[in-house]
Amino acid sequence: MRILIRRALTGLVLGVSITALVGCGTVFHPERKGQMSGRIDPVVAIANGVGLLFFIVPGVIAYAVDFSNGTIYLPGTHDTASVDTLIMDENMDVPTLEKLLSEKTGKRVRLDSELLRVEEVESLDEALALVRMAGVNDKERLATM
């Protein structure tokens, strides 16, 4: 009987440690990957905190993984720039594209503006990096510092 309890307890500790090491939010909500900010999901934060109860290192790693992947944030609560994918026809003309972008952003978009930069990227990660480097919403972020 003691061996059975010991094995169950060992399995439980091992399972919790492995989950904490890979990042709870990354395991539980992989669809959230790539979010840049937002409100923190309390369930994921508590699950990561369980790793801190066993040892400091698994908990810290879990938090680091979830923050770097963006999986600790609740969906739809981000307040900074994001990347949307728009499907375009090859024969779409400029006025139609401007109208589509204006409807999507809620602001008037002119493609002949000097301030507009259009680039084709290889992956979502590259697009997110370009958005971060663009300085979108920097005034709001700097005001909170």
Image (cartoon, rainbow, N blue to C red):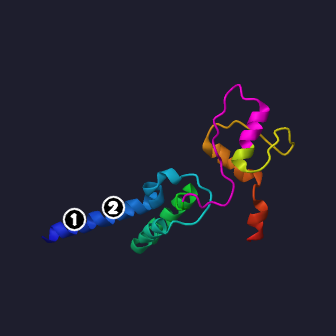
Read off the residue under disc 2.
15
The amino acid beneath tag 2 is: Gly
Q: Is residue 145 above or below residue 75?
A: below
Residue found at x 62% / y 45%: 125
Q: Residues within 10 Å of mark 2 (few under 14, many from 20)?
A: few
Q: Is residue 12 one of those drawn in magenta?
A: no
Q: How many marks?
A: 2
- Residue closer to the observer: 15 or 93: 93
The amino acid beneath tag 1 is: Arg
Q: Residues within 10 Å of mark 1 (few under 14, many from 20)?
A: few
* Prevalent SS, magenta region: loop
Residue found at x 66% / y 61%: 79
Q: Position of residue 102 (x, y in %)?
A: 75, 45
Residue found at x 69% / y 46%: 104
Q: Secondary structure at mark 1?
A: helix
Quarter holding the N terminus is bottom left
Q: Position of residue 45 (x, y in %)?
A: 49, 68
Q: Is residue 94 one of those drawn in magenta?
A: yes
Mark 1 vs mark 2: give the one in front. 2
Stretch in magenta? 75-101
With 60 as the anchor, is 139 left or right in this view?
right
- Residue closer to the observer: 136 or 145: 136
Q: CA distance from mark 1 to mark 2?
A: 12 Å
- Going from N to C along the chain, the mark reached first, 1 or 2, is 1
Read off the residue under disc 1.
7
Q: Which quadrant of the figure has residue 43?
A: bottom left
Q: Secondary structure at mark 2?
A: helix
